[in-house]
Structure formats: structure tokens, C-alpha cells
Amino acid sequence: MPKVSLFIPCFVDQLNPQVGMDVVRVLRRIGYQVDFPEAQTCCGQPAFNTGYWDEARPLAERFVRIFSSAEAVVSPSGSCTTMVKVFYPELLAGTPLHDDAVALGQRMHEFTQFLVKVAKVTDVGASFPHKVTFHDSCHGLRELHLKQEPRELLKNVRGLELVDLPYGEECCGFGGAFSVKYAMISAAMGDTKAGNIEKSGAEYVTAADPSCLMHIEGILRRKKSAARTIHVASILAQTAAAGGKTA
Amino acid sequence: MSTAGQEFLRKAAEKSADLVHRGIVRWNIDQYDTGVGKGKTRFADWSAARQRCHDIKWEGVNHLDKYLLQFEQKVKENGGHVFWAENGEEARQYICDVAARHGVKKVVKSKSMVSEEIHLAAAMEKMGIEVVETDLGEFIVQLRNEPPYHIVTPAMHLNRQQVSKLFHEKLGAAETQDPPELVAIARRWLRKSFFSAEMGISGANFIIADAGMVTITTNEGNGRLSTSVPRIHVALTGIEKVIPRLQDLATLWPTLATTGTGQPITCYNTLMGGARRAGEVDGPEEFHVVLVDNGRSELLADLEQREILHCIRCGACINACPVFRNIGGHAYGVTYPGPIGSVLEPHLRGLKEYQHLSFASSLCGACTDVCPVHIELHHHLLHNRRNAIHEGTHSAAERLGIKLFRWTMMSPGRFRFFGSLGRTALRVIHGMGLEGTALDPMRPWTKDRAAPAMPRESFRDLWRKQNGVH
Amino acid sequence: MASTDNPSRERILGRIRAAVQTTAPHHDGPAGQMFVPVTDPLDRFQKECAANITECTVTADTAASAAAIANVLASLPPGEIFVQDAPELRALVSGFKDGRPLRWSSEGPPNEASEATITLCEALVAQTGSVLVSASNGGRQATVIAPVHIVFAKLNQLVPDLEAVFARVYERGIASKNSYVCLITGSSRTADIEKILIMGAHGPRRLIVVLQTGG
């Protein structure tokens, strides 16, 4: 049985644990053995993005060591996957673990990209009879070229109607510390995104990045919008047997 | 945070809440996006164009001394003057000296962002010289006494009613809702100045080493008149604008037009290599090129960020930026707004005071995506952030906070403990209806958005339940 | 100007030289052909003119060219016409008897209130429907000052694309012989008000190319 190791980002572990469990459910359903190295904590992105590279570095080194023997690592977050694949080589340039970091990057995959490109599965037997729109999270889109994979998977979800999101590739405004340091700009960007979600007529907005969804959900709730957020893994985890229950 | 940073926060807050402004910018950008989309279809291979533009600028910037010297030699061979200005003050002084020597009373200006950067107009006005902006957008913002809103479309934030009222108040023109009539008003008004000014000042989109010429990319014709009629032509440029060969323009002109305005090529691409030659019918009697450093050579020395000097000032990054789309050009408070400004201005004006521009971004990367010369703009935002921290410009409290974060995350045990503690505390506080209030530790988040529900169990709790402890 | 007048020059150059001793990383990408080659230049030129709002009239001979130019002038208000003093234009314009004042470039620059200017050009570019002019075409103001600019060109001046026009510029020394060269594409315009495209800002509102294929 093929095996994957899970990288569950720190805030998913704490605030969106269900997303992690949904990833596990889907991977097992398509025949993968899943393990979760419990030593993991955080990839270091919050420190890296705020300019504290010297504080991020030990976290990155720790991360590389924890996953050094994993054959394949899967994560339900485009931004955290990007941190490892795209930024670890720069952060660890000139250090002993640089080459290991590069090698780990090759074995690290965002969840939907893993399903489609590595597991070569586009139908995970999911059922979710709702109108859904997809928000293209920035790191995934621009750093991982994540665009078609979630759409291919969603196309095969029974009962799901995928509608276009106007300005779908425009940033939702989360941006990590930016969301609180420049909260008014972040909120305005989120407000624009929420408006477009409402324009799409979708009941749910989904994405491959839980951080975007946390921010968008917060805005939608304040706007008293009817639309709700759901992570793409949680859609894929739904089956007819589970009654297509809402997240 | 620095004074400039606080001012930025204030203006950004004001503009972020301005839905009318947001709508105007959205409308403008939609027009631009449609135009550029069409424009790119004219290329057989758009990525080949980007690559060639990158190659040309890379060659110019990485051999800057060679090409600047070649340019200077050619200009001088043709009787022109070249002045190297360390900073804005030296550039202003040189141009003011030339003006004084020639008894200049009026200057007509074709668009030049460097002239904004060095505050040239104000210096000349102090000498009693009348400075007339002749680019329509620049003319409009000059009448309003405000800086340009955008490096390509300086007045995009205004509608025709506002322009009409402005022309009525400042020029005595009859009010009109007809845009062609508004342009005609400006044409009639400005024409008088073209023919009465003693000096014309232009920028330079590129300066060409093998020809000793400066080139300006325009549509209106004001740039041509400003540099053809007055006796003196001064071309003001950053040192990084030099390109090796005239034929490089076969690539740069269409690409700049495409990303700048969505046009296949702009109406007038003008090359000027000096004062009028013997036998020429007309033209200026004197030609001066002012090469401005103002921090560029320092940026050149930064190998990691040198490519920022590749910028051809097309504005594509500004238009793509979701932060710009919400706060607009004026909120930045600097010469160059948007991503290029956020990356460049801390180098030109000082990282300590202007680092906030590099922090005020969600790092979405749309800028890097659209840049025709392949500058990795959003990565340079990160580099500026890292440099700001290394220079020790952030508070001890913040440094302690990040150290605490690292200390917590270095241990799964500490992470579990503090995570659980935090969730519990927030669940209780929010459960008491204190979300968003002064007593809410999450207030920086919750003043603008609902807090996420705080789960009772973390993922690893659920995992352990399901799979046992390892 | 002595170097003592510009001490910053050496300082700036010194910093530049020190910096560029090391080259910065280069972004590697695939080379490729940017534009589809122009196979039928005359056809392409006419199409581009239509798109950028240049009035292009193709004529077979001198008589037809003279008639085309006369036609344009007849549609204009009475007023001075400025003409580049070149043998071809002397020949084309000599037959006009409409009595309007005519000023040649040999007499000096055009009057600000000129109704129209007539010039030759250095080249035409099919790729973009552009006209390359220089100071040799009646001066700098000749091609920008009046509301109407008429360009007389011959077919052998038409080149396929921008690469070709620069090759021509190098071959003929156009940039070294002239202090001023301008690539004109369409008539003067602006979109600075509400992004609405308005023709005729400060330059000519009408650009007319009379392109003679024969004679």
C-alpha cells in the first residue's frame, strides 16, 4: 500500500482540525496509508513573512529533519506547501540542510495536486449536491501553478455545480500578519472578494488554502451573507453515504 | 512606526472605506485589463517578448558603466551636454542653473516621474519660473495641486464632471460634459505655452547607448512639442534607463505599449539626440541630459535586488495589485505607487522610514506575474522585510513576540499546551459575547471579521483518538 | 564641460563600476519568435492603419497622388499649408491652384496656425501601420504642429516590421544624421479622462498617408 505523510499546518491543527481529518479520509479512501509525524509544529512561515528569517530558520531545519524519511508529504495548504517548496531553499541557502530542503520540496505536495498528479486520481467518490465556486489562493496559483487540479476533482463530485467566481484570481486579502497589521486594507480586499462570491450565486466558496477561507468566512459572517466557506478537502471527503452533510 | 508609515495607515484606512473610489479604480482597471488582454494576442509568443525585454534590461543594468559612458560620448559628439547628478538636489540645481543662465521664464514639461521624484517643479517655481505640465493627466493634477495618482494615468481617479469643474474654475472655460471638448480646452490652453516657453523638460523611457539618444513613448503630442519648440531641451532620467542598442526598441516599444496601455504601440515614439543640427529646419539650440542616481547605484550594488532597476515603468504591476485597487495611488504618499514603489521607494528614501510599504502587502504575487521584464517583485518585498528586521528597526516587543513564537513551535509539547490554552481562553471570552470588544485578545482580527469557532479538539487530538498515540 | 564642473560623475561611475564587477542572476527562459512574420506588407499596413485610424490612400502614380493630396486639402478650411521642400513634393503640389498660402520648409519652420503639413517620410512599417519621420522631413514641428499631417510615401519605403525599420535606420544613418527621429502610429490621442479614447490631443487629429505603388 502506498504511503504518505501528513503535514498539517499549525493553524489547521488548532483551528480547522476537521480539514485535516477530511484529508485523511480521502487519502485512505483512494487506498493510501497515512501517517502523521507528531513532532511537527509549524513550517515557520509567520516568522519568514514578517522578515524574521533568523527565527524561521530553526523551525525550517526542524521541519526538514522531521520529514527527511517521508516518501511523500501532503498538505492541505497551498501557502504552507509553497513555504517548503519555494522558500526553504532560499531560507536555508548556505546551511548544511539546504540540499535536504530542496529534496524534501520535490517530495512535498499540496493535497489536490497530489491527488491529480501523483495519485493520478480525479474521482474520489465524493458527493456534494450544492452550488460551489472556487477561489484561487495566491500562493497555490502563482507559486505552485495550482489551477486545474481542484477543478478536475470538483468536476467529478456528484451533484456539485461549479460556478465561476468573478475576479477569482484576485487576492482575498489575508496575507498573514498583513490581515491584522493592515487590517483596513485586508478587510477591504476581503469585502471585495465577499461581494464577488455573492455575485457568483454560490452557496459555498471553496479553496485549497484554509487561511484564505478563515478570512473570507470571517468577512461573510460580518456581512451576514448566505454563502459559507468549505475547504476543498472537506468537499471531497463528503460521500452520499454520509448524506452529503454540510461542513 | 515612522511618521510616513503612520500617514500611510491613515490614508489607507480612509481610502479602503471609500466605496466610490473603489468602484472608479475597478472600472479603470477593467478597461485596462481588457485592452491588455487584446494587446497580448498580437504577440505570437508573449513569454518570448518578456524574456527578450528581461535580457535587454539585464544587459544594460549589469554593464551600466559601459553603456552610460557610450551614451555620454555619443551625446557629447553631437554637441549635447550630460550632467551626472548624485541626488535630487544636484539635479535640480543643474537644471535651475541652465534656466537662470538663459533667462528662462516658462518651462513646458512632458511627463517625467523622475521630475516628481526630485520635486523639480517646486524648485523652479521658487525661482519665479512658471512650470506647465503638458501631459493631460499631469496638467489636470497640477491644476488640482496634487501629485500624480498613477505613473501612466495620472488622473484616473477623476471623472469628467470633476475635470470640467476644474477647467471652469482654473481656466475660465465653459463647463461641459463632453470629453472631446475637455481635451480641446486643454489643447487650446496648453498650445500657448508650447510656443512661449524657453525650456522644455522631458523624461526618458529609455536612453540608447549606441545612438546617444533619449526616447519618449507618448500618445498626445505634448512631448514632441515640448522638446521641439522651446530653445532648450532638458531630458531627465534615472541612470538605469540605458539600453545597449536602438534595435532593442523593436522589442521594448511594443511591449511597453502593451503592458502600459494595451496598445500595440503608442502614437509617438520619439528619439532625440541633441540640439538642432546645421541644416535642420528647427529644434532646440541646446540639449542637456541629466542622469540621476539618487540611490540607484546603491541598489545596483545589491545583487539580490539589482533587477528592480530593470523596471520600464509600464505600470502593469500597479494595475494588478489588489492593495492598489483598494487604496489607490495617492495613499502611498510617494512618487512610485503600487508594487514597484513598495519595493523601490525604501531603497530610494530609506528602509527605516519607508519599510511599511514593503509590509503593506499580502504577497499575492500578481505583480510578478504581469511584470514584462520578469522582476520578482513580491519576493523583493520579503527581502526588504528581512532587511528591515536585520537593521533592528522593529520594536523589542515584536522581537520578543516572535522569539516566543519560535520557542513555542520548537516543541510539540509547548505547541499543544499553548494551543489548547489559547483556544479555551478565546472560546470562553467569545462565548461571553466579548468578541470584537476591547477585552478580546483577538481584537486586531475581530474588529473587521468574525472569529473562527474555537474547536475543543485539535487535529492531533482527533488523530490520536482515531489512530492511537505514537 | 570640464569634469571639475561635475565631480559627482566620478563618484557615481566609481560606485557603478564597483557594483557591476559581479553580475546579478539572470532569469533564463525559452527564446521564441515574438511576432508572427508579416507576409503581405502592403495589406498589413493598410489593415493596421484602419485600426490605428491613419487614413491610407494607395495610388498608382504621381497624378493620382497629386489628386489625392488635392482632395484632402480641398476638405480643409482656408489657411496656410506647410510643405517639406523636396523635389517630389514640389512636383506634387505645383499644380494646386486653390490660392491658399503655401510655406516651404526651406523658408523656416511652420506657422503655429498651419492648417496642414505635407512631408515625406523615412519609412513605413507594416507591422504597426507606422510612419517613421525625422528632422529631415521638414523639421521637428512639421510632423506634429498642424491638425492635419499628410505623408507622401513610395512603396519601396514600406518595410515589414520594427526590426526591419531599425535595420534601415542603421543602414542609412538616419539616427546619426538627424537630431530627431519619430515613429508615428496614428493620430494624436489621449485616454486620460475616464479612459475614453479621444483623438486629436496636441498633435494632428488626422494623419493621412498617400502611398504610391508605381511611378
Image: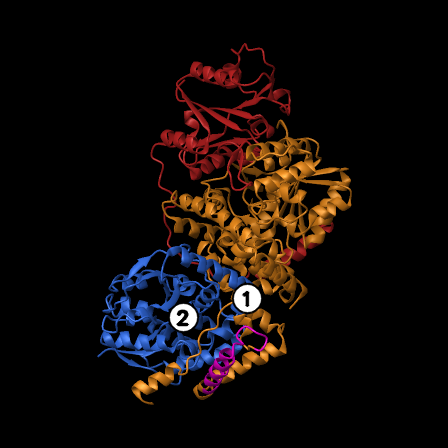
Whether residue B45 is visible here, answered yes or no, is yes
The colour of chain A is blue
Q: Amino acid at mark 1?
A: Ala
Q: Residue lying farthest bottom?
A: B469
| Residue B285 drawn at (x, y percent) | 68, 34
Q: Amino acid at mark 2?
A: Pro
Please rate how many residues cluster around mark 2, counting C-alpha atoms within 10 Å: few if below 14, some from 14 to 19, many from 20.
many
Whether residue A96 is visible here, answered yes or no, is no
Front residue of B425 and B60:
B425
Q: Is residue B438 magenta?
A: yes
Give the structural element (helix, strand or loop) at label 2. helix
Which range of residues does the magenta coloring cover?
B417-439
The colour of chain B is orange
- Residue B321 against residue B237 in the figure, above or below: below
The colour of chain C is red
> Which residue was labeled with disc 1?
A183
Q: Which disc number belongs to residue A210? A: 2
Where on the picture, by quarter, is residue B125? Answer: top right
Front residue of A85 and A30:
A30
Chain label for disc 2: A
The image quadrant where one finds the C terminus of chain B is bottom left
Q: Earlier in the sequence, mark 1 or mark 2?
A: 1
| Residue A90 drawn at (x, y percent) | 46, 71
| Residue B352 drawn at (x, y percent) | 64, 67
Where on the picture, by quarter, is residue C48? Answer: top left
Tags 1 and 2 touching, CB below 8 Å:
no
Give the structural element (helix, strand or loop) at label 1. helix
